[in-house]
Amino acid sequence: MFFKLATKSLSSRRGSVLLTVIAMSVSVYALLGVDHIRSQTKDSFHSTVSGIDLIVGARTGSLNLLLYSVFRIGNPTNNIDWHTYKSIISDPKVGWAIPIALGDSHQGYRVVGTSRDYFEHFSFGNKQKLEFAQGNSFKRVFDVVLGSEVAKKLNYTIGKKIILAHGLGKTSFSLHDDNPFTVVGILRPTGTPVDQSLQVSLEGIEAIHFNSPGSMENSSLENPSTQLLYEPEKITAFMLGLNSRLATFSVQRSINDSPLEPLTAILPGVALSELWQMMGILENTLRLISGLILVAALLGLTAMMLASVRERQREIYLLRVIGAPPVFLFLLIQLEALLVSVASILIGGAGLTLSLNAANDFLSYNYGLHIDALIFSEGSIHYALLVISATALAAAIPALAVYQSAKAK
């Protein structure tokens, strides 16, 4: 009866209650959305690369190097001479290396020039290796391997001929149309920028830029003469795996002090932590804004219930006549507020889930972020309890007013 009485009372004031529910739903949506996207983005960033000891590029800031080499955001300050790269990887402390050449694109997606070591040694998440959904790695000069999102969005399959473009824009007037590439492999989804990339050989990058059209053949990458003919002059960056993690700092120091040319070597984990610390200010600002929205909604709830107290003097009088104690009326007001709060949490959570489902492709395509639409987590439960507790606290003001009014009668 207690619950039924509360719902009937809310139903009799459905107009003002509905507006209050909408206001609180928006605040819950913002509060849960900021926390969920923050945690998902952080997980996505930290799972982008793993198992790599050092990333090396031309002299620049650590964050800039991390962003363009791993996240494909921004541009390098300079390139690295191929002979410098060969000299560094000849160090016995180096176990393997992945060269990277950037600067071309296809339909707005980045093209990554690299070696086949990329598919063998590059890891993401919890040291997960890249896997092929279809086909295999490039074996000839003009072979290309697609990330899962590229293949899905452009509807490309094995054997498709594609033209690369110079530059990074979606529209380019500098096409390498004399030398089409053939799709030979499609990678499984990784939830990282790899999904939005096209991988080609360094020899392929060199061939389309520095050889005259018609003089090239799509020859095997195993052919020594092909390797010699298409040996790159420059690369953008490279990743290193060391034989011993203990040698990381000594190798980093020797690269940073290299007499060959100005270089920067960074530890990916440290650079990721620096990146997230920089984003902490934005994160806290968003939390503050969402918190203020919640406070405003709770003040609206309090004002609505205080206004309703005056309208319900007759109702309170009748309840007192039939024997309802003041505590009963206090708890009735609290229950009504909690019902509004729970409804707002459910509506705000459902709206956030639908929004994330709808925006998933947009976030993945434009920002390389894969945000899980499942918002139920330890953090979201804590925020839901916070909203309920704050609602009970805000409702205490009109509830006490009713309690005092009932005691006076």
Image: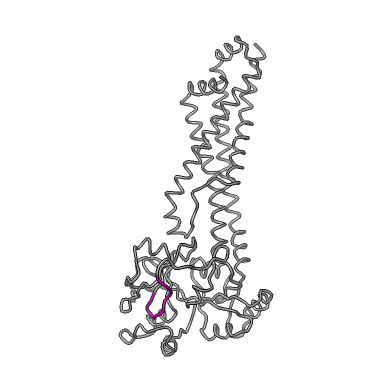
Quarter assignment of residue 57:
bottom right
Residue 216 placement, left or right of 37: left
Image-quadrant location for residue 330: top right
Q: Nearer the viewer, residue 339 or 260?
A: 339
Q: Is residue 214 above or below residue 125?
A: below
Who is closer to the viewer here, 274 or 182?
Answer: 182
Q: Was residue 138 drawn as part of the magenta stretch in this picture?
A: yes
- In the figure, is residue 195 to the left or right of 377? left
Please tell me which residue is depicted at 50% across the width and 32% down the height of the picture: 21
Whether residue 250 sits left or right of residue 202 in the image: it is right
In the rendered image, residue 288, in percent from the top left (x then y), is placed at 59, 45
User: What's the colour scheme?
Assistant: one colour
Q: Which quadrant would residue 248 be assigned to in this image?
A: bottom right
Q: Nearer the viewer, residue 257 or 131?
A: 131
Query: Magenta includes 91?
Result: no
Relative to 398, is 357 above or below? below
Spot occupied by residue 350 in the image (x, y as percentages of width and height): 48, 41
Kindly report the secondary structure that dominates the magenta region of the rendered protein: loop
Looking at the image, residue 271 lies above or below residue 332 = below
Above or below 325: residue 70: below
Residue 54, percent from left and from top = 60, 73
Quick one: quadrant of the N terminus?
A: top right
Q: Quadrant of the C terminus?
A: top right
Q: How many labels were placed on the picture?
A: 0
Residue drawn 56% across the image and 36% down it? 296
Q: Return the x and y of residue 16 as percentages of the image width and height.
A: 49, 26
> Farthest top residue?
321
The part of the chain drawn in magenta is 135-143
The residue located at (59%, 63%) in the rendering is 272
